[in-house]
Image (tube, helix red, strand yellow):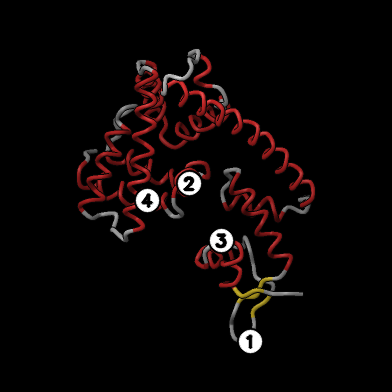
Amino acid sequence: MKQYTVSQMAQLSGVSVRALHHYDEIGLLKPAHLGANGYRYYGREELLRLQQILFHRELGLGLEQIRALLDDATFDRLAALKAHRGKLESESARFGHLIRTIDRTIAELNGEQQMSDKDLYQGFSPQKQAQWEREIVEKFGDSGREKIEESKRNFSKMSKEDMAAGKAEMEAINLAFAAAMAAGEAPGCERVQALTARHYAWVCRAWKPNKQAYIGMGQMYVSHADFRATYDAVRPGLAEYLAAAMKVYAESSLGD
């Protein structure tokens, strides 16, 4: 049976060597054995376990939750795969609705057709929004709840044109961060910090975070599977890069 070193496993799966070392340290993914040369070696069973780890990460579970789940004597890999497939099918249908909403909104902004106000929001998940709000309240308490309400009030005042402009600005900012990252510019350099100021101004359309809240937002971009996937889809590693830039900006420019 074929076996892989940690570097080969990283190349095969897209999971970094550092992450694989961390998974070993916390007991989430142990190698099949250690060679006489001290190298970690992974076999088919470890490949399948890593696949489960990645599926559960996509669904937003933390590493400790995943470890407990996979180590449970009642865990059924086949049943888990079927459950993953069901969730992905559901999400695929929702993404199809979102794509159609995007296309229809583009057509309206180009003067090709009109949409009802209700149609602007087809495909968005109330459950996902509620989940994000719960997580914010759990993390920040009453302050988080107040910011959610502030954000909702501000968004309710925006026109369709305001919303479209905000979306376009967000996409432009993300692409600019990705270009800076590709150019090897440090998160704390002057140009990236000017870009971060632009990002902060974009956030302030909805609510105005203080230093700790803005740092916390950056940390959420990294730790939350949905947010991380959004930014890393623009460029792999962008979530961590943006979080680092936000931390520098908050510590140098924002008050408590």
Which one is earlier in the sequence, the residue at label 1 or at label 3?
A: 3
Q: Position of residue 55 (x, y in %)?
A: 64, 49
Which residue is drawn at the image coordinates 56% and 65% (left, top)? 20
Disc 4 from disc 3: Cα separation: 19 Å
Which residue is drawn at the image coordinates 56% and 61% (left, top)? 14
Which amino acid does the dot numbered 3 rest on? Gly
* Disc marking residue 36: 1
Q: Position of residue 237 (x, y in %)?
A: 43, 55
Of badges 4 and 2, the one in the foreground is 4
* Disc marking residue 14: 3
Which amino acid does the dot numbered 1 rest on? Ala
- What secondary structure is marked by label 1? loop
Disc 1 from disc 3: Cα separation: 26 Å
Disc 1 from disc 2: Cα separation: 38 Å
Callout 3: few (<14), some (14-19), or many (20+) C-alpha neighbours within 10 Å? few
| Horizontal arrangement in the rendering, residue 74 relative to residue 100 (left or right) | right
Which one is earlier in the sequence, the residue at label 4 or at label 2?
A: 4
Disc 3 from disc 2: Cα separation: 15 Å
Which amino acid does the dot numbered 4 rest on? Ala
Q: Name above or below for residue 13 compared with residue 118.
A: below
